[in-house]
Amino acid sequence: MAESAVSHSHPLDTMLAVSDVIRNDRLAKLYARVLELDSPTVEELSEGIESSTTTIYEDVKHLVEIDLLERVTETQPYRYRASQVDMTIQAGGETFQITPTLLVALAERQSNENISLYIDRHGVSRLATAIEYGRAYTQSKMNARIMACEQEIPVLEAETILQELQEIILEAEPDISTSLNIEELDAAIDKQLDD
């Protein structure tokens, strides 16, 4: 089952569109760049992406056609905004959350060795899971030991990916609460270790 927050798209169309971006680094980078700049023109996008302007125009057109970008101005130069994707996919008894944060993390895989290595070892689905842990980590509700135990990975690997994802989460989700509650964190850790 999949739910979609992209307007006027059938959930299956949205799932296929997001799948297209997940498999194509260039599209993921473009989507992430539009999120970063809020409502850029193609010319503004071309300043931060290593592709020809023609390729960027074609990619923007494709992302508009699949409803992951929307044109927000009526006159040229057109400005574009990223659609807020929020899908929940259930497969094999597991639930995965597909959000802009995942797409931004995927866009980082070519320039971030730690994210690339994590994807190579565990796949995109486990990166999606790591982002959920990363949100809790960013909110001081989780630590690397708990993630490592639950995901059966080394603590150092968990700490490394959590730190990398924390930066992405804070950038992609600026409204996330980062207040530290030591007592709540200690209680959660004690409960996890007792289980």
Image (cartoon, grey):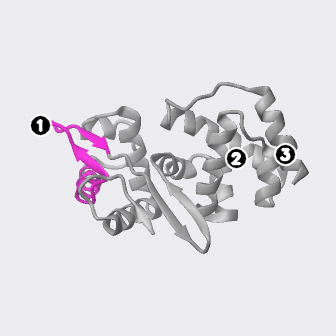
Looking at the image, residue 34 sits to the left or right of residue 137; the answer is left
Which quarter of the image is occupied by the C terminus? bottom right
Q: Amino acid at mark 2?
A: Ile
Q: Who comes first in sequence, dot 2 or dot 1?
A: 1
Residue 9 locus on image (x, y percent): 27, 60
Looking at the image, residue 179 sits to the left or right of residue 103; the answer is right
Residue 48 locus on image (x, y percent): 39, 38
Residue that mark 1 sits on? 76
Judge by depth and name the residue closer to the eye, 77 or 99: 99
Q: Who comes first in sequence, dot 1 or dot 3?
A: 1
Residue 86 locus on image (x, y percent): 43, 52
Q: Identify the magenta region.
A: 55-82
Looking at the rendered structure, the number of numbered marks drawn on it comes to 3
Residue 107 locus on image (x, y percent): 49, 50
Residue that mark 3 sits on? 191
Q: Amino acid at mark 1?
A: Gln
Residue that mark 2 sits on? 161
Which residue is pictured at 62% across the width and 64% down the height?
123
Which residue is pictured at 58% across the width and 29% down the height?
177
Q: Amino acid at mark 3?
A: Lys
- On the question of residue 44 being in view, the answer is yes
